[in-house]
Amino acid sequence: MREYPADWEALKAADPEVADAIANELQRERTNLRLIASENYASPAVLAALGSTMTDKYAEGYPGRRYYGGCEFVDVTEQLAIDRAKELFGAEHANVQPHAGAQANLAVFGAFLEPNDPDSKVLGMELAHGGHLTHGSPVNVSGMWFEFIGYRVDEDTEQLDMDEVEDLAKEHRPKIILAGYTAYPRAIDFAAFRTIADEVGALLWVDASHFIGLVAGGAYPSPVPHADVVTFTTHKALRGPRGAMIVCKEEHAKAIDKAVFPMMQGGPLEHVIAAKAVALKEAMQPAFRDYADRVVRDARALAAGLADEGLRVISGGTDSHLILADVRPVGTDGKAAEAVCDEVGIALNKNQIPYDPNPPSSPSGIRVGTPGPATLGMDEAEMGEVASIIGDVLKHPDDGSVKEKSGERVRDLMERFPLYP
Ligand code: DSN
């Protein structure tokens, strides 16, 4: 009998089309430079847990309180994930079941708000300034069912304006104040958000998806001591499986647990939860602190390099894993920049910048992030090289020889820092 039944040879024989696509994706990951700020590389141990037979198990409920028999081993892994999340983040309570960030955020609405209730207001960052789809977009349930009021970054500093947050909080008396964004490069003053929330009697919710891995590694301020509830995905800088978690104060534990199951979800994905436990254990190791430091060091070096190439770095720099840069000074836009970088094997995304005069489909900026390169071991010197390649192709998008040379430079870099060697 096999100890571990997942079998690559069996997949190739049973379904060569799917096996080919998976192999091609691995090859793409090995040859392309990943600068998408929200992506990373899960470890072989995390991948092994994901491919385990825990995918076969139904386990509605929580450890020790399930609706199905035979949960004794998934109880072990889910409890490990809960205990590790509480220990790593210093949290009073953890729910590790959300399938994705959107479900985790939906659970916050379920726990604390009533749909279509004029008193259920949320004060969050405007989407065009870095908020997320689930932070009140009119095409998402958050915006369809709940009333969001938006704050912006300051037009001059391009950083959070806590006076504006305070003024809006006093004017609208929201039930929840939300901090945590998808395209904000700077440190967030969570204590200041707490003070404002207390002034108006609001709950403080932080969506820490982008930076929770840096928090785990001690490279970014922790929202956990300040916030009532913190939601986050597990596959970004945290480098775990695709999924999410919620940590909160003990007083909210029952409301959050009921909102995740049975309100928002049915059976938990126990193979993913096992992989979350593995990722959390990895994040508790000293090497993870080195990685988190490297992520921020790399981002600062890449920001400096892009500025040297003539791009305008939004807010003048970064304190995190991501950089938002205005590419108009080098004569292009975000859409064209994304496309030409893709041609030479660099994956990044077009992004609106604060107060962007251009639409989301062809915005003025790009967003780049360093969790991927930092996982591969790339450091400041390599970020200088990456900035130089990006500068070259953005300034010469129609020059075949520049693109050929740039593609070679990317391939050489990826060969020097092999993925899953
Ligand atoms: N798609 C993620 C990002 O790239 O920021 C957020 O969900």
Image: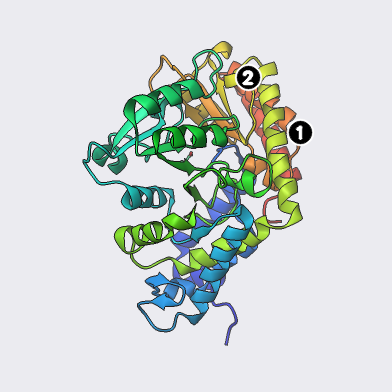
Q: In this figure, which residue is indicated by the disc labeled 1?
A: 380
Q: For this view, does 270 lie left or right of residue 213?
A: left
Disc 2 secondary structure class: helix
The structure residue drawn at horizontal position 48% and vertical position 73%, both measured from the top left corner, is 54
Which amino acid lies under the numbered mark 2 shown in the image of this protein? Gly
- Give the answer, above or below, for where 302 lies relative to 40: above
Instruction: Write down the residue under mark 2.
Output: 316
Determine whether 416 is above or below 253 in the image: above
Find residue 308 and report its horizontal and vertical position in percent: 70, 17
- Mark 2 vs mark 1: in front: 2
236 lies above or below 386? below
Q: Compared to 159, does 411 lie above or below?
A: below
The percent position of residue 338, horizontal first and vertical second, equals 51, 28
Q: Do the residues labelled 2 and 1 touch (CB within 8 Å)?
A: no
Give the residue type at disc 1. Answer: Glu
Q: In which quarter of the image is residue 55?
A: bottom left
Crowd around label 1: few <14 · some 14–19 · many ≥20 (10 Å): some
Callout 2: 10 Å neighbours few (<14), some, many (20+)? some
Which residue appears at 53% of the width and 26% of the height? 366
Q: In which quarter of the image is residue 265?
A: bottom left
Identify which residue, 357 or 244, lies in the foreground: 244
